Image: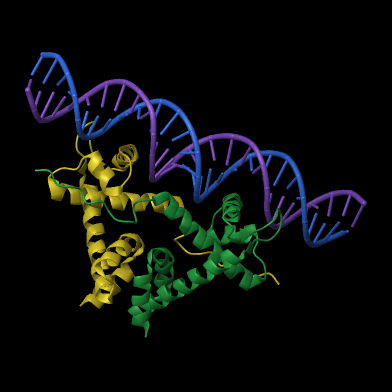
Chain colours: A yellow, B green, C blue, D purple
Amino acid sequence: MKKKIKARSVPFSQTRSRHASETAEDYVEAVMELVEEKGECRVLDLARYFNVSHVTVSRIVKRLQDEDLLYTKPYKPVELTAKGSKLAKRVKERHLIVLAFLTKLGVDKANAEIDSEGIEHHVGSKTLAAMKNFLK
Amino acid sequence: MKKKIKARSVPFSQTRSRHASETAEDYVEAVMELVEEKGECRVLDLARYFNVSHVTVSRIVKRLQDEDLLYTKPYKPVELTAKGSKLAKRVKERHLIVLAFLTKLGVDKANAEIDSEGIEHHVGSKTLAAMKNFLK
DNA sequence: CATCATCCGTAGCCATTGCTACATTTATAC
DNA sequence: GTATAAATGTAGCAATGGCTACGGATGATG
């Protein structure tokens, strides 16, 4: 009486790389925000933003530079590449939609902000469209 | 003209432990499902379920046993402890609510299943309540 | 231009979650 | 009961993201 195990679809296939992608999304979004807020984005700004040490930031920035999402030189500010900027805009737009969606759903501001930051990475295009539609 | 960097609230404070908790939630839920489906849950069942090697599963099972969520002995099936069972029920209920919510929102079944698996871990009690309310 | 605080990089540690390769145990078949 | 297949464990490697400790670079201030 053997039953086939139904493998979970996409989300569980590559947990580690998924997390890395989420990190990338968070970082480009943060860089964009910080540049808007104060003109430039330093490693320490990101460290404070994410509540991690500057070492962690610096390593991740290095990786994202290898992925052509960020650009920086030693002791210089962090900037978005064209690719990073494009991603950041998409991420931020999606974030704002999720936030507005949760708010309209009746979630208070504080919780909507917290949950939207976690949820946003898992909202596919179909779900995003449905949220947009709900907002209209 | 220094601006204070607004630190992001909870979600970014402890990325690693958050991911570990998500893993715990996924595993207890999977064990519960697999036990329901085929009477027992083996390491290899979980490996197929999550599309990872049995080695990865076996190490995680060991950790979750240390956390008193699972119980097993070498070469024996994996079972939920009372604590694990309680968590699994909560997780599954939340999962089903998120899935039903996305479906009612107009997302097709396939995408609702994919996205709900990612979203569920980030749905706080307030957001969950709002989703439940929407379903009524 | 020297000093000093701030910023950033490097070294090196740990935990988590992937993996392959190999060993061992358990169960099945003959 | 023995051989074989399947399941599980163990060893050891890599990538990612945490950290502390330390040292070098930058920039502001006198």
Query: Residue A112 falls in which quadrant of the image?
Result: bottom left
The residue nearer to you, when weighing B1 against D30, is D30
Q: Is residue B34 left or right of residue A44?
A: right
A76 shown above or below D25? below
Query: Residue A130 falls in which quadrant of the image?
Result: bottom left
Residue at the (44%, 66%) spot, across then down: B117
Q: Residue A41: horizontal and vertical position, in percent? A: 19, 43
Q: Residue A37: horizontal and vertical position, in percent? A: 14, 50
The residue nearer to you, when weighing B82 against D30, is D30
B115 shown above or below B107? above
Q: Identify the image quadrant of the C terminus of chain A.
A: bottom left
Residue at the (67%, 67%) spot, across then down: B40
The residue nearer to you, when weighing A39 against D4, is A39
B49 shown above or below B3? below
Residue A53 visible somewhere in the drawing: yes
* Residue at the bottom extreme of this rendering: B136
Q: Is residue B82 left or right of residue A118?
A: right
Residue B31 visible somewhere in the drawing: no
Q: Identify the image quadrant of the N terminus of chain A.
A: bottom right
Residue at the (47%, 53%) spot, across then down: B20
Q: Residue A23: horizontal and vertical position, in percent? A: 34, 50
Q: Residue A28: horizontal and vertical position, in percent? A: 25, 49
Count the marks: how many?
Answer: 0
Q: Is residue A7 left or right of residue A76?
A: right
